[in-house]
Image (cartoon, grey):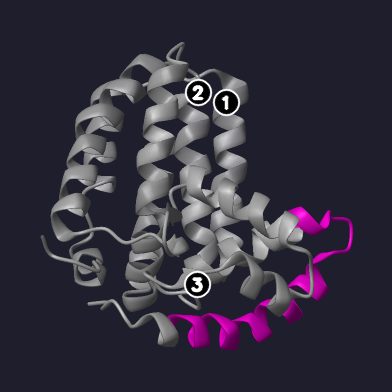
Amino acid sequence: MYSTVGEDEEVVRGLRIGGTLAALVGSNTSGQTVKQAVLDTLRNAILSGDLPVNTRLGQAEVAESLNVSTTPVREALRHLETEGLVRVDTHRGAVVRSLSRKDLEELFEIRIMLEPEVLRRAMPIPTDVLQAAEEIHEQIKSEVAPWRYPLLNREFHLTLYRATDLPRLVSILEGLMNQLMVYVSASLRADPQQMERSIREHALLLDAMRRNDVDAAIALQIEHIAIPTVALSFQATDH
């Protein structure tokens, strides 16, 4: 279980990790804007666990560590807030988001309530949408970095859901997935076999959708998004 650390320790930890982030930004800037490089680097560090929950991300400290101005850092942190990966605290600035056990259970429960119905309304899945989902599935199969999986998994499901004419509901689901990505990533690091199971479930789900077997697809979807038990051990608080 992650614990909240003192303010000074958080700053030191953030700056220490910043050295690694600076190297990553330097390697990521080819063909990218500085803003995108900072965003990708911070997101990857959060999802990989290099920046654990409750780590403070002060704009000035991050900018100095990455050898960039505060402007791309500020813009990146705002974007990460919309993704649910950080929260902005009036007194502490941006902090890597943490959730309680109750929060996690509620978020997964809401997903189980909503996603099967969205998938039902999306079927039969248009050929071009199904092809796009299959391409993401192939990316997931060839991806070796666990921190990349939550991003690709989110896009896999959202690609299918966007086949519906329910953009507001899809936006709500995207927000729910964003809030859970840190914990999904942490649970994958703790139990790498989860990713293998998920890939198998994606393949079965795609097969059911090719056959337009709505009942099978719904049953697979419910099983697929059930909360990973190991994820609960990574909550920061328990209130």
Q: Main secondary structure of the magenta part?
A: helix
The spot of residue 192 in percent (x, y) is: 38, 73
**Identity, as a three-letter code, of the amino acid under mark 3:** Ser
The spot of residue 237 in percent (x, y) is: 19, 66
In the displayed image of the protein, which residue is found farthest to the right? Answer: 31
**Identity, as a three-letter code, of the amino acid under mark 1:** Val
- Find numbered disc 2 in the image and state the secondary structure of the residue it sits on: loop
In the picture, which quadrant includes the N terminus? Answer: bottom left
Q: Look at the image and say whether residue 15 sits in the magenta stretch.
A: yes
Residue 146 in view, yes or no = no
Residue contact at pointers 2 and 3, CB within 8 angstroms: no
Residue 55 in view, yes or no = yes
Q: Earlier in the sequence, mark 1 or mark 3?
A: 3
Q: Is residue 34 above or below residue 233?
A: above
Q: Which residue is mark 3?
A: 48
**Residue drawn at point x = 39 percent, y = 80 percent:** 7
Q: Which residue is mark 1?
A: 129
Q: Earlier in the sequence, mark 2 or mark 1?
A: 1
Q: Which residue is mark 2?
A: 162
- Find numbered disc 3 in the image and state the secondary structure of the residue it sits on: helix
Judge left or right: residue 58 versus residue 237: right
**Residue drawn at point x = 16 percent, y = 59 percent:** 101
